[in-house]
Image (cartoon, helix red, strand yellow):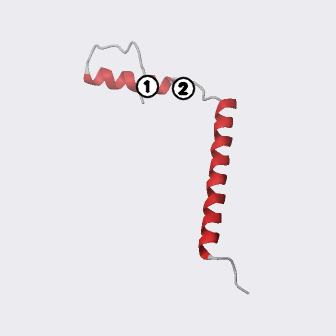
Amino acid sequence: MEGPSLLAVCSTAFTVVFLVLGLLALVIQLVTLALPARPPRTDRAVVAAISAAVATQQPGAQVVHIKETP
């Protein structure tokens, strides 16, 4: 009795993995739609650290606006 060919086993495994990854991508998309990311909150410690760093580099300067860029 001969088992399934190597080509059939590999193509079946590839197809199953592709379908599982597609399903996981769909689940991740649905989760990100249901639970959107929260806007970042500015921590007081971060503001103090940035203000101290600016004051060290530019004495007398004042931090007016802090914007996080990607």
Tag 1–tag 2 contact (CB < 8 Å):
yes
Q: Which residue is mark 2?
A: 40
Q: Is residue 35 visible?
A: no
What is the x, y in percent for residue 19? Answer: 66, 53
The amino acid at mark 1 is: Glu
Which quadrant of the figure has residue 69? Answer: top left
SS class, disc 1: loop
Q: Residue at x 70, y 84 (%)?
A: 2
Q: Which residue is mark 1?
A: 68
In this view, the residue in front, 29 or 61, is 29
Dot 1 or dot 2, earlier in sequence: 2
Q: Residue at x 60, y 61 (%)?
A: 14
What is the x, y in percent for residue 38? Answer: 60, 26
Q: Residue at x 63, y 76 (%)?
A: 5
In the image, residue 30 sits, relative to residue 19, either above or below, namely: above
The amino acid at mark 2 is: Pro
What is the x, y in percent for residue 4? Answer: 68, 77
